[in-house]
Amino acid sequence: MSCSVWALLQVLCILDLYEYIYEKLLAIPVVKGKKTLKEKFAGGDYTTTVEAYIATSGRGIQVHYYVCYSLPRGIQVHYYVLLTT
């Protein structure tokens, strides 16, 4: 299984978990989805979301997850391994 497929499965699993918590435990209906290209996380391949509206307070809740394979390269992140003896 490639890293991109594994990452997608992990993101969808977490979104399902959030949906379960909000709807089954907190009794708050949610909408799961994928953000548009204009709304997605900058540098990400795509951004998924779970959104809910709390009527009593008039507030909304958004939980975002993004998958980005090129972000470390784009901002020049370097990984170093520290070898100890």
Image (cartoon, grey):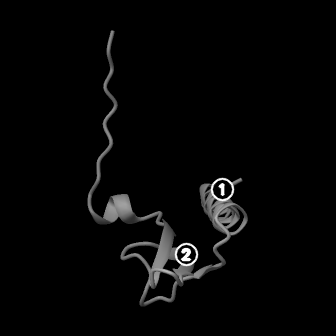
Residue 82 in picture, x, y percent from top left? 31, 26
Badge number at residue 49: 2
User: Residue 40's x, y, as percent?
Assistant: 44, 81
- The residue located at (53%, 79%) in the rendering is 54
**From this viewpoint, which residue is outermost toward the top?**
85
Pointer 1 local density, CA inside 10 Å: few below 14, some 14–19, many at least 20:
few
| Residue type marked 2 | Thr
Residue 56, image x, y percentages: 51, 81
- In this orientation, which residue lies closer to the viewer: 24 or 71? 24
Check disc 2 and report its element: helix, strand or loop. strand
Residue 47, given in percent of the width and then of the height, sits at 51, 75
Q: Which mark is residue 6?
A: 1
Residue visible at 70% across and 63% down in the picture: 20
In the picture as drawn, the residue positioned furthest to the front comes out as 56
- The residue carrying pointer 2 sits among few (fewer than 14), some (14 to 19) or many (20 or more) residues within 10 Å by Cα, namely many
- Answer with left or right where residue 1 lies relative to residue 41: right
Which type of secondary structure does the marked residue at label 1 adopt? helix
Nearer mark to the viewer, of 1 and 2: 2
Q: Earlier in the sequence, mark 1 or mark 2?
A: 1
Quadrant of the image for the C terminus? top left
Question: Which residue: 44% across, 72% down?
Answer: 44
User: Is 26 above or below relative to 2?
Assistant: below
Q: Closer to the camera, 7 or 21?
A: 21
| Kind of residue at badge 1 | Trp
Which of the pair 67/78 is nearer the observer? 67
